[in-house]
Image (cartoon, grey):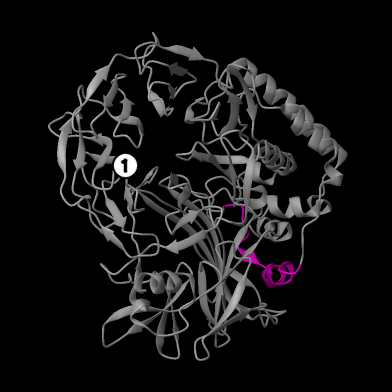
Amino acid sequence: MKNLFLLLLLFLPFSTFSQDAYLANLPISGGVSEIGVSPSERIWIATKAGNTYYTNKIGELWHIGPFGSFDPYDISSGKTFERVNFFDENTLMISGFIQEGGKQDFIFRSTDKGTTWNKVKFGKSSWIDAFYINENGKAWMSGNSQLIYYTDNKGETWKSFDKAGNENALRFNTIHFAKDEKTGLFGSFWNVLYKTTDNCETWERLPTPLDQKKYKRLSKEHRPDIRKIRIFGDYYIINQQGNIFYTKSDNINWIELPNISDFETTSDESIYLIEKDLKIELRNSEFVSVWKSDKKLSSTPSAINTKNKSLFVFTYGEIYKINKSDFIVSKLMTNEVPIREPYLKVNYKGEEIGFDRNAILRFDKKRTKWYRFMESLINVSNAVIFKDQIVIADNYLNKRFVVNIDEQKISQYELPKSLFNLTVNNINKFSIEIGSQGCFHSDRQFREYRLKNNSFKLYKKGKRFLSKMDKEINPQLLNDIVNEIDNSRFKKLTVNDLEITKKDLDNFKDFIDKEEQKIKKKGYDRFDYDKDYTFPGENTDFNFYKNVADRFDSIPDVVINQVFNTGYGNWSTTTVWRKMTIDFKNGEVLTIENSDDKPNYLYTPWIINFNGLIIKSNSLELGKLINELTNGDLYSDVSKEKNYAIYKVADFLYKQSLNKK
């Protein structure tokens, strides 16, 4: 009954104060690519940071395992765990890149349910990339040694088979064996698929989907890796380079499953398919659909497995158990560490309120611990006291809610029609800056203006920064910027806002032709990260880009809004930002900032912060006004080009079309 109560508690909002409100989210450190599930459905996780975690049943508490710690900065040297597997209820095994004394020739093995672990040597040193285990105590694995390691006694001893085929540096990424324990498929990191029918004594190379031209690589630089291969019934199913195909085993003719993102087989040779919309389908060994879920996963899976004809799905924040009768989801909770100090807090009526994912936290002064007081419908990325209310927003800054702590309720929130009480000369000063922060450097250049005699006069400036910008600024231009932020919240972009002419479109098509010829002549460099105009590869469908130009006026408004509401993000260790700060006479502060690694057109979208309330603006007019304010000196040249605006739309639509395939 206690376990059932806890399971129900994990599903429901914490509307009552209880001991379980002190449970913390499991602080997982390191990547997870596989999960282990025992016959009794104990679940273990081993991470690339060398940590292990486990629970005795879905819905129960999680625990730190024998390796690693709850410290996210504690990285175990020589312990890059790729997976943990069960031979039976008592016998477990961990493999990956496990090194000691400069050698990687052993795995960790436990025979007492993971309490104690021993090192078992398997042969020549190897980073174990691929592994398959069956329910009869047999397992096969392979890695960078290219040898194949085999056990038939639950990992107690191992023997080695020679490498498959004659290819140089053949490294397998995925292995799967049929129930006869002789027929196996081995998929490599580079478009090689081998089959054995006598347990690795002889080999037959099978055609891959790429070999059969069932899809086309966008570039020869892209690795055509075989990410997963499975056998079920008379069928094979494969994930090659993110594309899913299946075929009859006696006649290899790969057929694409364009709506599927992942799959896993069961002990009775049925197969679970995860659809791109995150719903689940179950097909039998004849590949006939027998069940589809109405519910869907909350996010893309990090790892999946099957046991007892159920599908288990891990998403870092949740674990699922799914079958025709159940769709159980449980959060990963532990009582072995306290709830961490929330990075996002507000002070409400003298009390700190914290936010962690979708949990709303309060602090228990007697226990000196945070506890979960409520749960929101969103993961909270912004929280602020705005007009005496707690206002929260989601990760995309699209949804907002008011949190009523006193009544323990959450309701939708609409921003007021006007954020600013703007009158003439209501702004005291403003500044513009460019900065960058990296591992080994920090740099900031700025320019500040202050109101004096009904005009903004230059007060401070960095050397050679914004040298084209006027030393005196008309206050009306600042008012226009603030008003545009206020008004653009209720506007949607249309293709007309881009002000694209026929000449612009013709120039764009000429540009695409030249880019295509340049790539054909010089080749495609996938490591050229600094270029603003980039394409997926030398086999890009450049006609697609030109066709977008031909139908540019008919592009839906929803696409235009999405293109210029999507930033590139930060993918390097260095952050570069452009920022404008406006200080009002009443003490309120407004910042307008963009810190994308690569600019969108006119540096959209801008992140607006007004007294802690954060909103996102894709207003092109705002971008133009800031450009006017600085006399065109703040932006890179390419970000101001109409050609770049057209490219951003066409590139968005092309990548969208690739994802739908």
Quadrant location, the C terminus:
top right
Residue 637 visible at all:
no
Residue at 41% across / 25% down in the picture?
180
Q: In this view, does 527 lie above or below 54?
A: above
Tally of numbered tags: 1
Decide whether residue 595 is among the magenta residues: no
Picture coordinates of residue 379 (x, y %)? 51, 66
Residue at 25% across / 19% down in the picture?
160
Residue at 38% across / 15% down in the picture?
198
Quadrant location, the N terminus:
bottom left
Picture coordinates of residue 76 (x, y %)? 22, 46
Disc 1: CA contacts within 10 A as few (<14), some (14-19) or many (>=20): many
Residue at the left extreme, as displayed: 101
Picture coordinates of residue 488 (x, y %)? 73, 67
Residue at 64% across / 19% down in the picture?
213
Picture coordinates of residue 67 (x, y %)? 21, 50
Q: Which of 251 and 600 is in front in this view?
A: 251
Q: What residue would you read off at disc 1? A: 85
The amino acid pointed to by label 1 is Asn
Q: Label 1's element?
A: strand
In the image, taking residue 426 as reference, residue 449 lies left or right, namely left
Q: Nearer the viewer, residue 314 or 441?
A: 314
Q: In this view, does 23 lie above or below 226?
A: below
Q: In this view, does 561 lie above or below 341?
A: above
Residue at the top extreme, as displayed: 166
Q: In this view, does 120 lie above or below 637?
A: above
Decide whether residue 476 is among the magenta residues: yes
Question: Magenta residues, as a range?
Answer: 467-490
